[in-house]
Image (cartoon, helix red, strand yellow):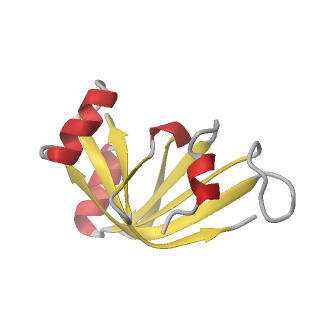
Amino acid sequence: MFNDVFKEVLTHNGVVSITTYAGGSAHVSNTWNSYLQIYENDKILIPAAWMHQTEKNINENDKIILSLGSPEVQGKMGMGTGFVIDGTAKFISSGEAYDMMKEKYSFLTRVLEVTAKTVKQTI
C-alpha cells in the first residue's frame, strides 16, 4: 500500500497535516514526517502527546485525512512530492504497537493508529 516514494518522504523533513471532522467542523493538527511509522501493510502509527481535539473527533467520527510531503523527494513532475491518505483512526494506549512506539518516542501518552483506505500521490 505504501510505495517506495512514500517511504522516502518519511525520511525527509516535512509537516504532516492530520484532519478530523466531528460536531459540524473540521479540526487540523500537525506532526512531522519522521514521526510516522508504517505498521503492518496498511497502518501508520503516530506518537501523540496532545491531540486532545483530534481524539475527541475520532471518538465521534473515525474518518481521517493525512496530508504530507517533502520538497526534497522527486515527484511526478520532477519537483517535490506529496501524498493524501484517506482512512480511519483510533487512539491506542497499550499493546505491542504502543510499546514499540513508546520505546522510540518517550514523550507520547497515546498512539494514533491510522488504517489507510487510499494513498494518493498528489504531485
User: Measured from the top left, where is residue 54 in percent x and y?
Assistant: 35, 52
In this rendering, position of residue 104 left or right of residue 93: right
The structure residue drawn at horizontal position 42% and vertical position 62%, both measured from the top left corner, is 20
Q: How many marks?
A: 0
The x and y percentages for residue 27 are 45, 56
* Residue pictured at 62% horizontal, 61% vertical: 83
Task: Determine whether, in the image, residue 94 is placed left or right of residue 5.
Answer: left
Would you place residue 114 above or below residue 101 in this image? below
Q: Residue furthest right?
A: 78
Quadrant containing the C terminus in the rendered view: bottom right
The image quarter in which residue 106 lies: top left
Residue at image location 28% in from the left, 32% down from the top = 108
Q: Is residue 29 above or below residue 114?
A: above
At 62% from the left edge and 48% from the top edge, which residue is drawn? Answer: 8
Q: Residue furthest top?
A: 106
Q: Residue 29's spot in the image, x, y percent?
A: 47, 47
Q: Nearer the viewer, residue 52 or 75?
A: 75
Residue at the extreme bottom: 117
